[in-house]
Structures are given as C-alpha cells and as structure tokens.
Image (cartoon, rainbow, N blue to C red):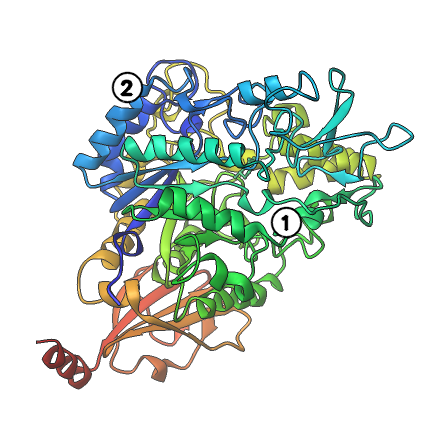
Amino acid sequence: MALKWWQKTVVYQVYPKSFMDTTGSGQGDIRGITEKLDYLKTLGVGAVWLTPVYRSPMVDNGYDIADYKSIDPSYGTMKDMENLIAEAKDRNIRIVMDLVYNHTSDQHAWFRESRKSRDNAKSDWYIWRDAKEDGAPPTNWRSIFGGSAWTWCEERQQYYLHTFASQQPDLNWENPQVRQALYDAANFWLEKGVGGFRIDAIVYIKKPKELLDGVPDGGDDMVNIHTMTANTPGILDFLREFKEKVFAGHDIFTVAEANGVGPEDLKHWVGENGIFDMLFEFSHTCLEFPEGEIWYKAEGYSPRLIPRLKACLSASQAATASDGWYPIFFENHDQPRCVRHFFPDEADPGAAAKAMAMTLFTLRGTPFVYQGQELGMDNVAWDSIEDYDDISSHGQYELAIQSGCSPEKAIRAVHRYSRDNARTPMQWDRGRQAGFTSGTPWLPVHEDYAMCCVEAEAQEETSVLSFYRRLSHLRREGNAAEVLQGGSYRELLPEREDIFAFCRKLRGRETFTFVNFTGKTADYDKELLEGAELLLGSMENACKGTLRPYEAVCYYRESETEVRSDENCRQ
Ligand code: NOJ
C-alpha cells in the first residue's frame, strides 16, 4: 500500500518556551519558531509538533490550558500563529498542535463555573466526589506529579480529581457537552489549517464506574493513579466518536500519547480499524522502572538495559508489521536526553547521539526528533531541587524524601530523570545565552553550548547535526529511501547483548543497521553484509565485521534480479 505523507517525513518536536526568544523575555515565542523554519527545512522536516501554546497559567508549562482557542500572550498572538502556519506551509511543513483533553487548567472558565456549586450548568463537567466519612479523599490515588489525586474545594464541599497537578482538574468525558466542546476546539484548529494533532494523556479520559482504593506502591500509602484509571474499558467508544467528529476525512495525522497501550491492544488504536494514525507508547523509555515510574526506585543505567531495549523495539516493529504505524522516538520534553538514557555515563555524547540517530532513522516508523537532539544536547545536574522548574521533579523529590531517601539520593534521581534535562534552551550559537535570548533565559543554558550548538555543528562535517542531516536525506531520497520508509523489519543477531542489528527489505533492496551500544569493540559475522555497500557510518573508515565503541553503520544491498523483476511488474 502506498505510504502517506506523514509516514515518509520527519517530524520535529518544538518545546516553544525553550526554542527561540525574539522579544528578550527569556522565553521562546511563536515568532521564534517562524524564524527557524528554514533551519528545520535543512533537517528535512515535514511536520512540526508544538507542545501547547494556548492561554495557560503555565503551572505545567502549557499542559494546563485556560482557553483552547487562544494563544498565550507570552508566546505571541493568534496572528503570529496564523503566520507560522502559513510560512510553514510555504515550506511544505505542517504544524501539529497538542490537544490536552484529559484535563484543563483550574483557571479555565469551565472549571471556574463548575467549582461554584453542585448545581450550576457545568457542575458535572469535572469529576467531583464527596469525602470519605472521616473527611479523607475519596480514594488513595497518587497523582502522577505526586501527592493525592484529589483536592478539596471549599465552595462545593467536595473533592475534584486530577490525574496530574491540582491545577489540572480532569474533565468528565461522560458528559456529551464536554466532549462536544472539545471537538469544537479541535475543529477550530483544523479550520486554521493545522496538519495534525498530538493528543495528550488520552489513556486517562475514561474513569472506572466505581472509584476504589488501590494497593499502595510507594512510601506514602497511595497508589499511582495510572494503575487505577489507564485504559479503562469503554475508552474506545469515546475515541471512535472523537475520530468521527474531528479527524475523519482530513489529510492530517494524529499521534496519541497512550502510555500502557501494548502491542496486543494496538489494532484497536491505530491502523486500518483503529482510531489514531500513530501512538506513543513508552515501554522502551521506561526500562529502568519495572515497578512504575518512581524515580528514586529506578535501576539506573546498566548494560542489562540493552537486551531489553532491543526486545522492546523489536516487539513494536513486529506489532506494526502488517497494520498500524509507530512514531520512532527516543526523546521528548518529558524524557532525559537520550545520550544519557541509553548509554553509560562515560560514553562520549557525540558518539552516543549518532548511534541513537542511526537507530531512529533506520527503524520502520516515522522519526520524531526532539529539539536539540540533533545537536546531541546533554542532561544537566543542578545542585538543589530549588533550581528545578519542572513540577514533576519536585513531586518525585518529595516522594523520595518522604520514603526515607537521603537528599543526595533524591537529587541524584532528579538529575537523571528530570524533565528539565530536555527543557534547557535550544543552543543556536556561540554567543550570549547560546543565541536563545537577549534577556535572561527561564532555565539556564547548558554550559556545553559553545561546542554543542547549531553554529558550531553546521560547519563541522563530523558533527551530530551533519549526521542527522545526512540520515534525513538518506531516508527521503536515493535508492535506500523507499526501503527505509516502507521496508519490512527483521532483527539480526538477536542473541547479542551489545549490538542492535536489523535488516529492512523492500522489493530486492535491503538496508542493514548495526549499532554497538557498548564501550567495547564488537565483532560480528561480516558475511551478513556480503555484496552490501556502506551507506553511512557514524565514524570514519567503517570496517565490515567490526564495530568500535558506540559505532553505528548502515549498509545497502540490491539484488539486481529482484529489483528488475519488480520494475517490470510495475511498468
Ligand atoms: C503528558 C505531557 O507530555 C506532559 O508534559 C504533561 O505534564 C502531562 N501529559 C500532563 O498534561
């Protein structure tokens, strides 16, 4: 079947607050994104996903929306947004908006009304419940950012539910008026010409009929709300309606954040009979959290992660072999930088970044690049929890301390997993504040910016940025492009604990990717590559059969007879 535009392109994720500031406010803005469209074009980007830019009190940097149909003044105006969509379109880039539909801000007019009384017109637009007899919250659920998932409201003398922060009350999707209001907002953006949607935290929209206590899983007598509400049966009915009233019939793509939807459920969610075009699932980014995402309990990096990473990636490739499609991603605004996530501390970040890039661009699926990933940007490690802005870092730190961890252990976990790792300003040049702002940036610029920035890397043939540009080109043009886009996937050397290797194949054309995830030289049988030519290597002078530490290579082979017979068939 012919591939759609979004299966052949590269998607770039922009975190607007940290991308480019044109006013000196210290925060990025929409005009800054427009200014950098030509840069994005050099990466072969065909769609840009913006994390939320709507009006918001910014308790969770925009994931707390106060009005779905307006732009936050710190980002600019609706005119700026329309201009961005138009300028992007001129460059064949589509703008993809983030729909945050599990919850709103507590400052949204809907919630302000809902909280006033038990009988106003929006009284059941959110999830309200009475206290337990002793006045305690209705259940022992812990919100994803820490603390109870229930907050008391004096006016109504009731608790309201929030999967995330208390300033992010959950909407009541059982109410058809709520659903219609959300569909209207999405349609408003479709009329503005957006090219798709990323749909936030969608697995939480349906709550169980009865809200019951769960078995505690931390040091605080609470249970993670995810365990109690994610993917509640009946959710697909809501989603089918969502598709019908919004997405159906538009030439856009949708990608849902669907934590916990495993390969076995995939067919209901994406593909021929599914709802979305793609979904983000996180099995490969949560490898260090076998018991749920509690940072202080994480296993930390160990070589044991590599076989698990390979298994997760191969499982997701298998799940979409005949139907459905995945986004391929190793970073986003909630994840640490991948050069630390999947590699030991001593790994050279440049080599690690290229190894990950090779994996990203040669697997089957649409590559999603997160801002700065193409430069090999690295994590930060600030001294005190007070230096961190990210709300979840504070929640996780508190939970660690409450559970008896020392402050040193608690801050180490924050260093490793804080979302601020990915949110430091984009590094454009060697000048003041890395060219991000003429003012004081809202988060400090990473100290490595003079070496790791667009200006330095654009001039350097062997830089991470140049490598990304080459990979993106290979995936879009030339003999290997079709294979890399649509070819089948077969894992090679599955027993190896150091090398991730796989083959892609389409009509007589094959690519072979080999990535060494360790700091040791790794040999493999070079016969596997007989007759194949090097397409791209992450280091100079690649040698068939041997990978240097963190080296990644991609080879190409064509079987003339198969290619010719296919061409004859197609004529
Ligand atoms: C997932 C988003 O990616 C994250 O940044 C946000 O904090 C939560 N959903 C809540 O909307």
Q: Residue at x 82, y 47 (%)?
A: 216
- Residue 294 lies in what quarter of the image? top right
Residue that sits furthest to the left in the current view = 571
Which residue occupies the foreground of this view, 567 or 269?
Answer: 269
Which residue corresponds to mark 1? 230
Judged left or right of residue 476, residue 200 is right
Image location of residue 91, percent across then percent down? 18, 38
Which residue occupies the foreground of this view, 340 or 542?
Answer: 340
Rendered position, 4 above or below 488: above
Q: Is residue 517 visible to us here?
A: no
Whether tag 2 and tag 1 are in contact, CB under 8 A, the answer is: no
Image location of residue 118, percent across then percent down? 70, 22
* Alpha carbons under labels 2 and 1: distance apart: 37 Å
Which residue occupies the foreground of this view, 510 or 216?
Answer: 216
Ligand 1 is within 8 Å of the C-beta of the residue at disc 2: no
Judged left or right of residue 12, residue 205 is right
* Crowd class of label 1 (few under 14; some 14 to 19; many from 20; radius 10 Å): many
Q: Quadrant of the C terminus?
A: bottom left
User: Please, what is the three-letter code of the amino acid marked with disc 1?
Assistant: Ala
Q: Residue at x 54, y 68 (%)?
A: 311
User: Please, what is the three-letter code of the amino acid marked with disc 2?
Assistant: Lys
Which residue occupies the foreground of this view, 433 or 308?
Answer: 308
Q: Which mark is residue 79?
A: 2
Rendered position, 261 above or below 412: below
Which of the marked residues, 2 or 1, is nearer the chain's N terminus?
A: 2
Q: Quadrant of the N terminus?
A: bottom left
Q: Residue at x 63, y 24 (%)?
A: 167
Question: Judging from the image, what secondary structure is the residue with disc 2 in?
Answer: helix
